Image (cartoon, rainbow, N blue to C red):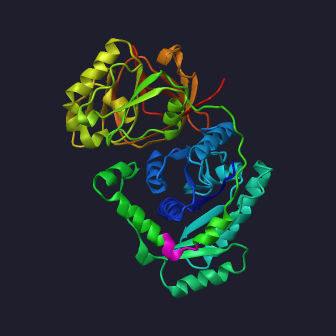
Amino acid sequence: MACSGFVVSGLSSGSGKTVITLGLLNAFRKAGVAIAAAKSGPDYIDSAFLKAAAGQAAINLDSHAMTPTLIDSLLHRHIARHHAKTLIVEGVMGLFDGTHNGRGSTADLACHLDLPVILVIDVRNTAQNAAALAAGLDHILRQHAKQRYSGASGTHIAGLILNHVASARHHTLIAEAMSHYDIPMLGSIPTTADIDVPSRHLGLVQAADLAASGRLDSVIDAATKLVETHLDLNLIQKLATPLSLQATSQTALGAPAQHIAIASDAAFGFSYSHIIDEWASSGATISPFSPLNDEAPHVDAGFVYIPGGYPELHLQKLSTATQFMAGLQQMASRNVPIYGECGGFMVLGDAIVDADGNRFAMAGLLELETSFAKRKLHLGYRTLTTKQAGLWNNKLASTLMAHEFHYTTATRMAGEALFDAKDAASNDVGTMGLIKGSVTGSYAHIIAAIEA
């Protein structure tokens, strides 16, 4: 497998790295470059945008939730599946933002993959200081690679992209300062070229929502024009360095059944492609169904998975989806394993209360009522230990890595807990989720199992 790659990172969220990554993916694809796309960290929304720009699935790579061996295994299969020659990885938050020990950061993933980093800096409120920031981060990144990854000799700040440049003089001031450092300027994007990607409380509006409204292509086209006009694409491609990955058979999460029904529509779009792809690759039949279209899970499925998403935007429609609800209830009566996470977990409960206090009845399979009226942020990695053996037809691993990200509150929750949970610093955070018969669910989004 001959594939080279680079990482696009920034100083913080909102630096412009998503738009630039979208533009690079589509520009390279248009130029006939065989590309693969990846997202650092647990963000499933950005991955869907990368998928749209790349024209193929994008994979999440998480150096906190995944072992180095699993990262290599997933990425090796991902690149081989798409016959990719160039890998573009979008970072998460700022370059070194991550867990308390540095794991989970973009820098840590770049060092593990031994890839160079293209740094995007929003320079609206700075000038020459941007050069000092880039040089300082380059020094720290090289030290991080040397100390934690002795074989990572290729990880450094390979180039700088300026975003929101106010004028030609503004550009010149920074370029002159950058001339003192061995970091090439790859281009500068003027403030007038800003692209608005709509957002909501969990991040960007989903790519599927923009596609449904006819806006997704225009966002990607605008991002592509932006990088084609203002960046040196030939130089950027030359900065990519060869990848060396271990080809192993390690999997993130074994298939829970030979036939899996998966809820998939605008209300339930927060699933990880690496898990679904692994299930399919193992020979499992995947049967998507749409709760918003009042579709029930396939009657022959041996497992039902309801991912997270934005059910709160569709409560009236979901509460009156009688075929969907009846299908879940029939599956539960036959002891078919059902798992809902985050939004899917909420739908398995008795009711969801919207932000205005209106109550909408749900499936009633778990003793749970959740509310958007009592808004509180719950965010962070979770290490989950199952409290009961034999779950999911003995297919649920005893220990899992997951991520929690929601604003809702469980105003009523009764019954047997599904998991014991710890945070990223290994502090106990109590129990999570519920079990009732064959029905299970929690707020956590499972990323990978931890091998025994």
Q: Which residues are magenta?
A: 227-232
**Depth check: 397 or 138 in front?**
397
**In the picture shown, does residue 176 fall above or below 354?**
below
Residue 71 percent across, percent down from the top left: 64, 41
Q: Residue at x 33, y 53 (%)?
A: 211
Residue 371 percent across, percent down from the top left: 30, 36
Q: Is residue 229 magenta?
A: yes
Task: Check the image and name the residue furthest to the bottom.
Answer: 169
Residue 81 percent across, percent down from the top left: 57, 43
**In the picture shown, does residue 162 fall above or below 253?**
below
**In the picture shown, does residue 348 fall above or below 53?**
above
Q: Quadrant of residue 438?
A: top left
Give the left or right position of residue 37, taking residue 370 as reference: right
Q: Residue at x 36, y 63 (%)?
A: 218
**Depth check: 53 or 430 in front?**
53
**Depth check: 28 or 75 in front?**
28
Q: Is residue 423 visible?
A: yes
Residue 151 percent across, percent down from the top left: 80, 50
Q: Is residue 22 magenta?
A: no
Q: Is residue 206 visible?
A: no
